[in-house]
Amino acid sequence: MRQHYTFHELVKALQDAGLKSGDTVFTHSNIGLFGFPDTGSSEQVIFETFLKAFLEVLGPEGTVVVPTFSYSFGRREIFDPQNTPTNMGIFAESVRKLPESFRSNDPMFSVAAIGKKAEELTKDVSNECFGKNSFWDRFYHLKGKICNLNVFCGASTFLHYVEKELSVPYRYNKFFPGVISINNVKRRKNAVFFCQDSNNTDTQVNIDEFNRIGFEQGVIETVKLGRGTIFCISAEDTYQLIEKTLKKHPYFLISAFNELSEPVFLKRNLPISERNLPQNSSMADMIAAVWDLPRDLVSDGYDDALNLLASQIPITIHEYPTGTECWSWIIPEKWTCTEAYLETMIGERIFSYETNKLHVSAYSQSFEGVVTREDLFNHLGTHPVLNDVIPFEYLFYRRDWGLCCSQNVKESLKDVEYKVVIKTNFNFGTLKVGEIYIKGQSDKCIVLCGHLDHVNQVNDGLSGVIVGIEVMRELLKQKDLKYSYRLIICPESIGSVAYLSQNEDLIPNMEGGIFLEMLGLQNHHTLQLSKQENSAFDDCCRIILKERDPNFRIGKFLQVVTNDDRQFNAPGINVPMLSLSRVTNPTGSDGAWLYPEYHSNLDNPDLCDSSQLQDSVDTILAIVKAWEGNYIPVNKFKGEIFLSRFDIVYDFANDPGNGQALFEVMHSINGKDSLIEIAKNKNISFYVVSDIVNQFYEKGLVEKK
């Protein structure tokens, strides 16, 4: 094959490949492989010749688009559309630099375009790299063509757009936050990349079968030029080829197809825990079994903890795969830390993940290298209240690395440089939500909720889960419950969002709920009301807490301690979910920290009092009892009741309070207010109101509504 070719031969080759005037063309290129045109031998000459040939063929109505991918957010780099270079080849980089070029603001998969529709294709693209209104979406609907220069058509990034449109199971949405700089003005932005698990060899890209079918069906045009080849296929033919083939071979675009095997999407990184829990274990034993497992949002440690708890009570485990759309949220990847430590330059180990899992921020990126003391401190978390503890920190929705230690250890670090090693994996996984459901006479239900994640933390999250399990154990013993009861065990925030978004049909029957956490502390209860602070369930909880724990604290929604109760109270859901805890300081108060040991290695089993847990169990059961016993009494009497006639006796002289309460309650029965509302309005114990009205009911003086 000769090395040189003329400009007219290049134009004819593009036309023979199927390009014509007015086309919109996307091209991956390796133009150097063709050899040099007969007009010169520099890279610039090659570029100018090919660009001129494209413009000659496409004419004034045509458009040329090139990949200027930077993967900036994936590399934790700032993306500057004007200046960030691309390594997609000389042709793409040269087009990007042209003054008439338009570049999209996609911080991962930007493209540059020149021609009639250049601005239309690149302006204000979606933050979803392959989603609706992305460049690829616009390109497809404009009936674009892929014309690759010495690059097989199967290697075109457009294939990922088709895979997303067809919802292939081996790719998933992944959130990439970052910073974009335009005209030296920096602002936060995010990208959502429909990616595959880079650590799973079964799901690696395989273009061989696509190319084979394309050539066999004649939808890929091939034209030889110089030492190279031009490949061309329309976006429509690409879509149809993939759509049709996926129905027969759903994995033909990944490496598993070559192995003629079903891909394994879910792979454990850690051995299954060998721990076990005897039946009917105590709350303290349950905590001891799971508290130090690496219980991150989506992780093997979280799964092991949930499975251990499922040995104590029947739990339905729901699984939501990585990338699942949950309203506006996206299920994250599974995270695993295999090794992490900080060393001096002479190899002295300062701390490690092996000695305490809190030494690494949850969902930290991998990092290995030598860093300055200043850079280390930018990534080194300490506790804001206590100087001698390791903090619990997380980087759930940030792409960064992080270590943690005590303030005292940090202050001891005087060297100029240190060695950092963090080895973590991000894999396709499934977020697990445990559900315990007790069916009552009505589908109307009360929801309890607690979060199971947060490694090495006991009061923060785990205590609420354990109290919830104990409450459900007791409710399982009861018969003829009027209402149904549901306990949701999930990772914080994203877990309840996942459950609610995938079970919207259950929401209308949720009459109220309580988020449970921080219940083993030596403090009185703190009740945070729901957004609907005057709901019947708010009133019930408030009345019972006042009777059981007169020194309890109370606060409005979002003003004490916020957690998954926000998700249940959120717009469009509006379930009156309260929060029950034992925090000492409310969120947002000046200098406040929920309790001194919060988010530290001191929040361990020693800080969790079993008697306090039991008191919380009894309090919730008292709330349930009141809710079950509540009804609207409808009076069947007129005038004041002649009490003696019905053997309703009270001793006004010796017990004036009870006598007064009897008449207060009698005069409050109006067929509209429930027992809870009467107790609230008259500031009388619910149980006193219930006892009085039940006496009237037994004598046929009221009926229950």
Image (cartoon, rainbow, N blue to C red):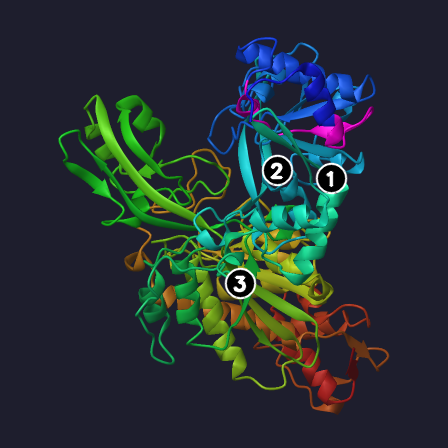
Q: Which residues are magenta?
A: 15-35
Q: Residues within 10 Å of mark 2 (few under 14, many from 20)?
A: some
Tell whether position 351 is magenta: no
* Quadrant assignment for the N terminus: top right
Q: Amino acid at mark 1?
A: Ala
Front-most of 564 and 595?
Answer: 564
Which residue position is annotated with label 2? 157
Q: Amino acid at mark 2?
A: Thr
Residue at point 50%, 66% (across, down): 548
Q: Relative to 353, is 286 on the left or the right?
A: right
Residue at point 43%, 49% (across, down): 199
Q: Which percent across, then down, holds residue 468?
A: 49, 68
Which residue position is annotated with label 3? 433
Q: Amino acid at mark 3?
A: Val
Between the C-alphas of marks 2 and 1, the distance is: 11 Å
Q: For the residues carrying marks 2 and 3, which lies nearer the camera in this image? A: 2
Between the C-alphas of marks 3 and 1, the distance is: 40 Å
The numbered mark at residue 235 is 1
Q: Are marks 2 and 3 in contact (CB under 8 Å)?
A: no
Q: Which residue occupies the extreme right position in the image?
A: 638
Tag 3 secondary structure: strand
Q: Is residue 318 above or below residue 55?
A: below
Quadrant of the image occupied by residue 693: bottom right
Q: Are marks 3 and 1 in contact (CB under 8 Å)?
A: no
Quadrant of the image occupied by residue 233: top right
Tell whether position 16 is magenta: yes
Tag 1 secondary structure: helix
Q: Relative to 299, is 112 on the left or the right?
A: right
Q: Which residue occupies the extreme front position in the image?
A: 1
